[in-house]
Image (cartoon, rainbow, N blue to C red):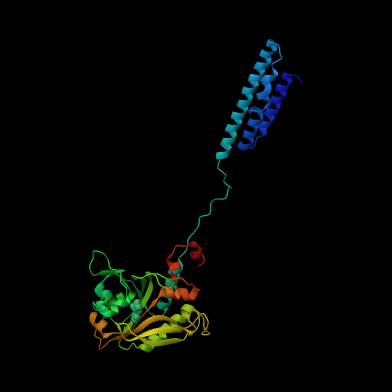
Amino acid sequence: MNLEESLNKIWQDAEKDFEGAENLRQLEELKIKYLGRKSYLAEFPSLLKNLSSEEKRKIGSLYNDLKTKIQNLYLKKKEILSEEKIKFDFEHPGIDIKIGHQHLISQTLDEIKNIFLQLGFSIVDYDQIVDEKENFDYLNVPPNHPARDMWDTLWVKNFKGYLFRTHTSVFQVPIFKKFGVPLKAVIFGKVFRYEATDRTHDFEFYQLDGISVSEKTNLGHLKWTVEKFFEKFFTQKVKIRFRPSYFPFVEPGLEIDISCVLCNQKGCPVCKKTGFIEVAGAGMIHNFVFKSAGIDYKKYQGYAFGFGVDRLIMIKHNIDDIRILHSSDLRFIEQF
Ligand code: PHE
């Protein structure tokens, strides 16, 4: 094959090859094959050395034409393939959009609300930043009373007398003033404590408080109500135990325990082998509170209770660190 024939052959091959390129990567490989530094065409000029000058001119110009033609082949094909690349592929699967869901705390609050609605309570709400009088004084905890130490308080800077409510019991007097009695109501929400955190304490957490007041409401009603509530919440029978305790706004004051729902009283780390877990503070509403609300305490009586929602969630779902509930860790959130 003489030089002219070999140039023709290269042209035929190149036309076929470039035609067949399916993507830009293949095209770049062809460019290297035909026009690259080690290609036949790159070495071609050295083959012209021994030719007569007339032949050199002839073959030389054929060679130059061929190079330009191949370059054009390359450019044209590149244009075609690039256009194809930006064409929209309607069948390409899209990126999954993650749809969120209610957090375990909100799910549980809804669950608890429904149970209390079934038990005949109204759901009410109240402020998170409150007056010290509502949080303490009206509830029989005057300034400098040692009982204030039961609630480490976050005060609002530059607003003297205002604080982040330390308990949902803060709602009692305002709600009595607003709706009067008889009344059965519960409140849910965040409360705040100036406290170091550990596995069972956080500086903010959820509480639930309930009150029921009429002319005849007594501790028996309280016992029945909490028993029904916990049975529905834990979907199993529970035993209720009252222990005497002290909260300034109730008299008598109680601590409520329920039989351990995790081990059925066989003894486990959660109930510390006692068979019971402490779940709530409660008692009969103190006359002082009725007086603060302007209610005739000789005519009306009632109970109050309060518990930590996070703690109930931890018991129900066997979670051993309260702080994970308020983190935004998806590995946790996605489990519920
Ligand atoms: N508010 C109390 C607390 O935070 C709990 C409680 C509520 C006790 C109602 C008695 C009655 O500790």
Residue visible at 67% across and 34% down in the picture = 20
95 in relation to 205, above or below: above
61 in relation to 208, above or below: above
Q: Nearer the viewer, residue 266 or 300?
A: 266
Residue visible at 40% across and 84% down in the picture = 256
Residue visible at 25% across and 78% down in the picture = 138
328 to the left or right of 66: left
Residue 247 lies, in percent from the top left, at 32, 82
48 to the left or right of 269: right
Q: Quadrant of residue 158?
A: bottom left
Q: Which of 326 and 53 is in front in this view?
A: 53
Q: Quadrant of residue 290?
A: bottom left
61 in relation to 114, above or below: above
94 to the left or right of 117: right
Residue 307 lies, in percent from the top left, at 39, 77
Residue 26 lies, in percent from the top left, at 64, 36
262 to the left or right of 48: left
- Going by the picture, which residue comes out furthest to the right? 1
Could you tell me if residue 185 is visible in this image? no
Image quarter for ligand 1? bottom left
Could you tell me if residue 278 is visible in this image? yes
Quarter of the N terminus within the rendering: top right
Give the number of callouts.
0
Q: Quadrant of residue 202?
A: bottom left
Residue visible at 28% across and 84% down in the picture = 286
Residue 218 lies, in percent from the top left, at 34, 88
